[in-house]
Image (cartoon, helix red, strand yellow):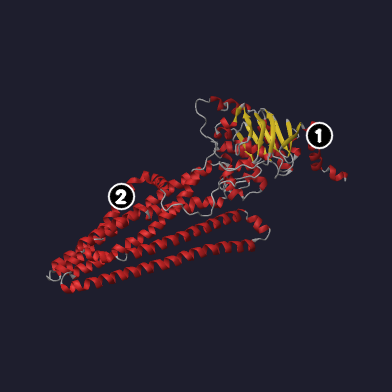
Amino acid sequence: MTAPTSISHEEEALNKAFDLRLARRLLALVRPYRWQVAGALGLLLAVGTLQLVGPLMTRRVIDVAIPAKDSALIVQSTLILLAALLAQVIGAYFETVVTGKLGQRVMHDLRRRVFAQLQRLPVTFFDRNPVGRLVTRVTNDVESLNELFTSGVVAGIGDLFTLVAITVLMLVVDWRLALAAYLVVPGILWVSAVFRKRVRTEYREIRTKLARINAFLQERIAGIRVVQLFGREADEAARFREIDRSHLAAHLRSVTVYAMYFPAIEILTTVALAALILAAAPRVEAGGLTVGTLAAFLQLARRFYQPLQDLSDKYNTLQQAMAASERIFKLLDETPEPERAGEGPDRPAATLRADAVQRHGVTVAFEDVWFAYDLAHVASGAAAPAEPEWVLRGVSFSVRPGETLALVGHTGAGKTTVINLLLRFYEPQRGRILVDGVDIRQIPLDELRRAVGYVQQDIFLFADDIATNIRLSTPLTDAEVASAAARVGADRIVARLPDGYRQRLGERGSSLSVGERQLLSFARAIAADPALLVLDEATSSVDSEVEAQIQRGLDVLMQGRTTIAVAHRLSTITRATEILVMHHGEVRERGSHRSLLSAGGLYARLYRLQAGELATAS
């Protein structure tokens, strides 16, 4: 079986140094800020031009002012040089501010796009991509693009302009000295090419190790209770030290590359300057070259080599940004969840009836539904398994408004999968699911999920206040929030808290017990006033007294509505309209509690096991 595609934290080399397709998409990110880009370029060009003032004033003073003993000309040249330096400082300051703001705004926009995309991706995407890797995309990869816009492309264009301007001036001043200065250029280019290749490899390794650190930290921090419960602190610390050591080693290798590169460039530059002096000395002695021209030329040569060195570093920034943009755009190109905005005005039948949603509940029907997770995870173009491991096999049932359908069975029987398909977290490979006679694939996803009140087995509360966690996206007043909490007895929890409904919870509601979190999840479901109530092992973590209180609230909520309940405690579903007994993905038995007990099949056995009758008989 071909593995599904995923956003790996392992870095891969780009097929080519510059990808025009990616470059176009990167340019689209800065299009809203084209005037800032133009301003930054203008400032860079001005600063590059001002760098030529120093060598020209030096030649003027040495060749003209000093021989003529013209103090006024010396002062004038000095003032012009100081003014140029001041203008350079001011220009560099504003260029840094403009490019810094440009990079931050592009990052702001891009992070919002990436986060919005992550919220729209299907559950199957998160099944195959660890959270730590996705965090790396939103943080480190976006940061690489920030460096591209702040100190990469714009500054690189400025370096190119400076290089061209100095080259022209060197040729104008003395073309023979210019040719002598160019003799070390091949050496600088060769050293820079070697540096680029080595540092690109090391940067890729650094990003790989960093992504591993992020993934490791996210998993261990999320599972800190398990780590501490089983005394794995020392083992996990040792594993983290190993990952962190490899990250450190990669960084140190990159430091070594830089430590070798810059001295090599400095040596070549010094050799070039020495060669210039040796080449110019006979001409100065013969009177064919002035000392001022030589001094100016030495300054120009130093300024000429600096952009070459900077451009090599900018090339590496471009390479990092290309690699980062490739991963970011790969994430942005992932296929999102099914259409959220609906199927268009030509399909009115795909809209749930407002009266059914608000007052009478909905009719839900599964028609010969087959589902396999391995097929759900196979990406387009990948080879499907010869014989999938079916989680659901030909499941069919129907539940109408005012009725309660209960799903029971051993762990792994497919109960929760039924709920996942109903909520369109996954799509069935065969059969169809209908709500009020409409295939749910034709119903706008937001509309479908708004009609459902879902109480999960794994309760998730946000690190926000209690009122927000109950309200979520439902526009409720504070009184309505309090009423929803009171209907399931959650108001007793709130009354004990110092800030009441404004009390902020810890991450995932960690400041509350499991039972308290479950009560709040019921209040959330009741507050939404749903047409379809879905309970997935909803009372598995509360005691009998709390369960009875919740049941009284549910009885009110379930009147006239459709309810589908996945139950582990069979005592909670004895009053269900119909009970489906699932086994290995199939519906083996169906009927009321009384009829299933009298049949003496799987349900009767499960019920006796929970009641302890088998243990008593033995």
Disc ID at residue 232: none
Give residue 382's position: percent from left, percent from top: 58, 43
Three-letter amino acid code of the residue under disc 2: Gly
Disc ID at residue 39: 2
Q: Which picture quadrant has residue 397? A: top right
| Closer to us: 480 or 598 | 598
Q: Which picture quadrant has residue 432? A: top right
Q: Earlier in the sequence, mark 1 or mark 2?
A: 2
Give residue 142's position: percent from left, percent from top: 46, 51
Q: Is residue 165 visible?
A: yes
User: Of helix, strand and loop, which one carries label 1?
Assistant: helix
Q: Is residue 421 above or below residue 176?
A: above
Instruction: Please give the name of the residue rendered at 79% of the width and 33% of the height, measured from the top-left corner.
Output: 596
Instruction: Please give the name of the residue rendered at 12% of the width and 71% of the height, measured from the top-left corner.
Output: 69
- Residue at the far right: name it: 617
Badge 2 crowding class, 10 Å Cα cut-off, few under 14, some 14 to 19, many 20 or more, is some
Three-letter amino acid code of the residue under disc 1: Leu
Label 1 to label 2: alpha-carbon separation: 80 Å
| Closer to us: 51 or 229 | 51
Mark in front: 1 vs 2: 2
Residue with the mark numbered 1 = 597
User: Of helix, strand and loop, which one carries label 2?
Assistant: helix
State left or right for residue 466 relative to residue 587.
left
Q: Is residue 491 above or below residue 162?
A: above
| Closer to us: 108 or 311 | 311
Give residue 583's position: percent from left, percent from top: 74, 39
| Closer to us: 207 or 228 | 207
